[in-house]
Structure formats: C-alpha cells, structure tokens
Amino acid sequence: MRTVEYTRQGDATQVLTLREETCRLAPGVGEVLVRMLVRPIHPGDLIGVEGLPGQPPEQQSGARTPGVEGMGVVESVGTDVRTLRPGQRVAVFPAPGTWRDFVVVPADLAVPVPDGVSDETAALMLVNPLTLCMLYRAIEKALSGQTGPVLQTAAGSSIGRLVSAAAVRHDLQLINLVRSTSGAEKARTLYPSQPVIATCDDDWQGQVRRHAGERGVQVVLDSVGGAMTQDLAELLADGGTLISYGHLSSGTTSLEALPLMARELTVRGVSILHWMSRAPKERAEDVAFAQDLAQSTPDLLDVAASYDLADFRSAIEHARRPAKSGTVLLTTPRTADSGNEAA
C-alpha cells in the first residue's frame, strides 16, 4: 500500500515522502474499506502540511497523511453495513489521510457516486459544493434579507466559480475580484452579468466602490486573507461582514488594524472542517445538492491535471501555479497492485 506522509511541517515538496508497505486493513462495525482511486489537492491540504504563514510549525508526534476527500471503490464492508456493497463507487468526506491507496471510513461518510458521473468529478463532489452551502448560509445571515452587494475574492478559483454560478441562480449582486487582467477577461466571459475587477489595477478599490454604489459592500467573501484583509475591510459599509474561509496570501493583518468597533464590522470564519457539526437533516440536504451538482453541471468541478500518487511533488507544484484553472488530482490506476491484504 502506498502512502504519502510527513513527520514535520514545512514545504510540502520537501517534507512529504512516499512509503510503501504491506499491511492488513479491515473495516470495523459500521465502516467500509475504500480503495482510493482519485484525490484532489486542496489549498487546505497544503496548509495542513506547511502551516499558516507567520505561525510557528505545529508540533506533532508520528507520521500524518494529507487529504480529506476523494473517490474510490468499496473493497469490503464491516458488520451492520447494509447501504453499501463491495465494488460500489463512492466519494468520501471527511476521511483524513486520503493520499494513500486505502482508507477505512464510517459507512455514512461514503457517498454513492451517481451513474454517469466520472471518477474525476466524483473526487471533487463533496468538499467544494459543501463549502458553497456553508458560505451561502453565512451570506444569507449577514445580509439579513438584503440583496447585496457581496464582494468575492479569488473569483477564478474552484469555489469562486461555484459562488458565481450560484449568484446567477439566486439573483445575488456579486462583485468579483481576481488577481490578473487575463483572469478578469476569463471571468467576464463565464459570468458577463457580474462585474470583475483585477487587483493588479492601481485603482481596484475605487472600481469596487463604483460598482457597489451608495449602499456600499455589505459582505466580503474572502479566501485570500493575509495583508489584503485591511483593504477589504475598508471597502465594507458600516455594519458589514467579512467572511473568511481561506488563507491563500502571505502576510497577516491583526484584528487591531481593523475598524471593528468604530464601524461595527463583523468578522466571521467558515470552515468545511466544521460541516459535521451541522444537523443531520442539513447535512443530508447538502450531500443531495452535491450529488445533483456533479450530475447536472460537472463543468463547475473542473480538473486542471491528473498525476499518479507517486508523482505528488509535480502535482503540488502544478497546484501552486497562479494561472491554473481547476483542481489538480492524484490518481491510482484501477489495475494497480497496491500491496494491501484486505481482510
């Protein structure tokens, strides 16, 4: 069985190693053993390996394996599992350690892949669509019945595209920020009704204010963070909300630098890692939404490139490219001999 692992935080291309071992994995009561075939490289996966900028490395004991999501085939099922069968395609989340050939997960966290959905799309079916559900709930709460405007950073990212598509369906007034002029042109082509502004422009903040109008920006949806946070807070109208759900940028901004009290601003975080704390009914609705999205609009879950699991360093370097479109995947051939001796 192949496993990508690390024993200390640092540059992912330096601290991650590939280990091969023969082990015996078997599912317990209510669990399934999944042979992983495709896993995405999410920004959060690399943050877990490298840590956040400006913070000391996390002290850890023992080896860890990145990844929380992926697609595979059920190898075997434990007792009391009636909803899944060996050979069935499933998407898994949250499943810590998916950058390996086999994982054992609770059966209720293995979601059947709908017929007609490709393996690659299935590998992206959960984390980003479920994050979209969480973000939209946070936006609705912040707007309190108003219609916007909402300012979104990293609009060209995988989640950014999902937010833009949902804004069209829900008639949400969205203003998109991207890094480059070429990125802005591409975003305008995809969603012509939404203003797109490149932050490489000297007057990008002035452009945002013009598009926001007299009401100003009511909500900022930010996955960039870092030094840009203060600029985004300045664009918020009094009483506005900054929703942070990522840290793609370097640098930091202290809370003391933000005019929270003087302008009654709210800063809140959203993390997919807290999705499991939602009510079971809400989680079931989110999963059904994700399955439908994978079937109806798979182009929103686009793939930048695929690499074999052993070639993880090249895959990480590709995932870091600023101009890439889509998500980089790590794969295992269906015919590969993984070395696992499943009970």
Image (cartoon, rainbow, N blue to C red):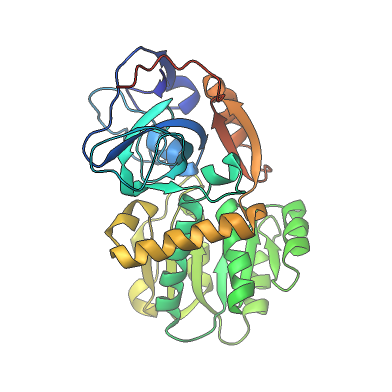
- Is residue 195 placed above or below 53 in the rendered structure? below
Q: Residue at x 38, y 37 (%)?
A: 48
Question: Foreground residue, 36 or 17?
Answer: 36
- Residue at point 66% right, 40% down? 304
Residue 141 location (% of width, % of height): 40, 77
Residue occupying the point 35% across, 16% down: 341
Image location (x, y in percent) of residue 90: 46, 42
Nearest to the observer: residue 338 or residue 205: 338
Between residue 99 and residue 72, name the one nearer to us. 72
Q: Is residue 247 above or below residue 205?
A: above
Image quarter where the C terminus lies is: top left
* Residue plotted at (56% across, 86% down): 215
Report the number of discs: 0
Q: Give how far across and how far down residue 71 sits, in percent.
A: 49, 39
Say which quarter of the image contains residue 287. Answer: bottom left
Camera-side residue of 98 and 179: 98
State which quarter of the image contains the N terminus. Answer: top left
* Residue 305 visible to an observer of this rendering: yes
| Quadrant position of residue 164 | bottom right
In the image, residue 130 sits, relative to residue 70, either above or below, namely below
- On the question of residue 203 being in view, the answer is no
